Image: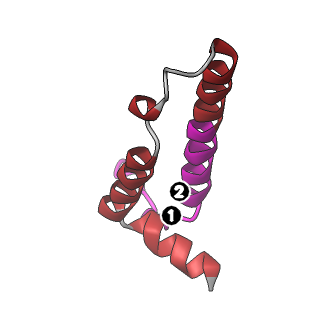
């Protein structure tokens, strides 16, 4: 069942992009509290970067479910 849902998402580029944008809206650099000390701010920046990387990896995994159309057998017209 899960694979079917992931396949639907992967086969629909509009849906895939909409999901990516929603994830990007949830957490962005503007949300950082700059009134904290440098150590805490650095930890927040690291967490932000790790989260972005994890989300990108998830979407790469989802794209592996995309249906690949069968290519017609190409024949050489010179034969």
Asked if residue 3 lies left or right of residue 35, the reply is: right
The residue closer to the viewer here, 45 or 6, is 45
Q: Is residue 33 above or below residue 78?
A: above
Q: Disc 1 marks which residue? A: 66
Whether residue 64 is situated above or below residue 57 in the rendered picture: below
Residue depicted at x 50% and y 63% = 66
Inspect this view and state whether residue 70 appears.
no
Disc 2 is placed on an element classified as helix
Depth check: give the residue in front, 7 or 53: 53
Q: Report if the CB atoms under discs 2 and 1 are less than 8 Å apart.
A: yes
Q: Is residue 54 left or right of residue 72?
A: right
Q: Position of residue 76 (x, y in %)?
A: 41, 51
Magenta segment range?
Answer: 51-78
Q: Is residue 69 left or right of residue 36?
A: left
Q: Is residue 2 visible?
A: yes
User: Which residue: 56% across, 80% down?
Assistant: 4
Q: Quadrant of residue 65?
A: bottom right
Q: Position of residue 43 (x, y in %)?
A: 68, 25
Calculate the distance from the C-alpha at mark 2 to the C-alpha at mark 1. 5 Å
Q: Is residue 76 above or below residue 8?
A: above
Q: Is residue 74 left or right of residue 57?
A: left
Judge the density around disc 2: few (<14), some (14-19), many (≥20) Cα neighbours within 10 Å. some
- Magenta stretch holds residue 14: no
Element class at badge 1: loop
Q: Is residue 55 magenta?
A: yes
Which residue bears the numbered disc 2?
63
In the image, residue 68 lies at what x, y percent?
49, 63
Say which quarter of the image contains residue 44.
top right
């Amino acid at each position: 069942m899960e694979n079917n849902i992931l396949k639907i998402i992967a086969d629909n580029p509009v849906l895939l992009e909409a999901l990516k944008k929603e994830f990007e809206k949830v957490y962005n650099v503007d949300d950082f509290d700059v009134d904290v000390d440098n150590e805490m701010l650095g930890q927040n920046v690291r967490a932000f970067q790790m989260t972005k990387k994890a989300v990108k990896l998830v979407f790469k995994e989802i794209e592996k479910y995309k249906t690949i159309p069968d290519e017609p057998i190409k024949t050489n017209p010179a034969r």
